[in-house]
Image (cartoon, coloured by chain):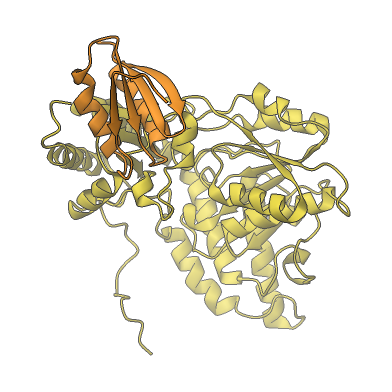
Amino acid sequence: MTDATLVLDCRGMRCPLPIIELARHIVDVEVGATVTVLADDPAAASDVPAWCRMRSHEYLGADDDAYTVRRLH
Amino acid sequence: MSTRGVSEQSGATPPGYFDAASTEPLHPAAREVLLAAADEGWADPARLYGSARRARLLLDNAREVVAAVVGARPDEVTFTASGTQAIQLGMLGTVAARRRQGGGPRAVAVSAVEHSAVLQSAAHLARHDGTTTTEVGVDRDGLVDPARFADAVDDDTALACLQAANHEVGTVQPVDEVGERCAERGVPLLVDAAQAAGRVALPRRWSVLAASAHKWGGPAGVGVLAIRRDVRWRSPLPEDERGGGRAPGFENVPGALAAAAALRARWEEAEAVAGRQRELVDHIRTRVPELLADVDVVGHPTRRLPHLVTFSCLYLDGEALVTELDRAGFAISSGSSCTSSTLRPSHVLAAMGALTHGNVRVSLTRDATRADVDRFLAAVVDVVTRLRAGLEAL
């Protein structure tokens, strides 16, 4: 499903918890590497890309409930 | 008889009430008229004796006042039981007239940020009348591109719907431009003016217009449905002679007259109120990102309603914000999923690509002051800082 460096399983969590997890763990990967968030709260579809825009990371897209982000800084 | 929970209180807005977009307290002008009209306009306006003629006169008077403000002829205006009912009757009746025995155009074009009453009516038409719904997206500011909307309107379009202004983020839509394109194609355009009526100049190029009196300081239970004379409309409901054959049931004459009085008063003071509110809203829009990190202020910066401003705070739960601000004495609403019964985030924020959690919608009443707003900003900073405790490093 994904070859991300790190996969965060946030299924069952309600927003903003998946976004908080993403923000906590983005620093666990190198700059340029990717993090995939598994989230079944429908708000994640808006909030993962919005977080990337606000925090200047790259949103790579979603595959079902898997949202992938590239750390840019 | 007991009316428990009702206290003897004047109509003054409680300070800290920042949810005018949900409903505004009764305008002082409406208060007097409501009482007077309850005494004088109680009779059946459809009858022919003196008290009935009096009620009819008051109803006609209300219609004239509302027609003048919304830019319609008096005979184009009908009072409904609510703004939602006006939207439902407007959409269903227009589509019913355009689609005969299942023939005729079958698409309903709507913007992605319409009020749920419009989207639900479109879904209802799809389920029961075999229509399809064409949704037109918006940009980051919640604004519809008129050219894109026009592209979605073709010979198969039965009805187009575009709000005058958005109820969650305040963006004012280019209705007249869209209306011109719809007129060229002979497609009726329904405009939901619920948030705009009495506050800003309304668009002119509509076929059907819907509004709601309690949003402008009229009483609840009064909606407005205006249908241009040259627009075909067929009632989707069983036949009823009331409401000019458009809205069913005995007319709420005192409510309609009070609604009209509030609308006229709002219209007369609109420029002064909007001027004050714009200053306060600009102040909030400037100060919130200065006072707080990681906040997304949403809605168009200039093409906007004067009284409404929305922002989202990263990492926060909308419900917690509503609850904590309530505790601090402020009433606000939120489009975050945890504050909706469906646990779905606001379709408006999602369509704009805005952050949906930690959402705060502030909408000012006509008498909001700078001091109220400054107290509110201080409370927001305090609440957000407390709720973000432990998340500072993110």
Residue B147 appears in which quarter of the rendering? top right
Give the colour chain A carries in the figure. orange
Q: In this view, does B75 lie above or below B103?
A: below
**Residue A59, x across and y down, in percent:** 39, 19
Q: In this view, does B345 lie above or below B275?
A: below
Locate residue B348 relative to residue B297 in the image: left or right: right
Rendered location of residue B386, percent (x, y): 12, 41
On the image, the x and y values in percent for residue B370 come to 25, 39
Q: Nearer the viewer, residue B140 or B14?
A: B140
Residue B95 x, y percent position in the rendering: 77, 49
Does B189 sit left or right of B309 as displayed?
right
* Residue B388 in sight: yes
Give whichever of B315, B239 is nearer the camera: B315
Residue drawn at x 17%, y 51% as measured from the top left: B328
Q: Which of B48 and B180 is in front in this view?
A: B180
- Report if residue B314 is visible in the image: no
- Give the residue displayed 67% in from the left and 31% down from the top: B176
Quadrant housing the C terminus of chain B:
top left
In which quadrant of the rendered view does residue B89 lie?
A: bottom right
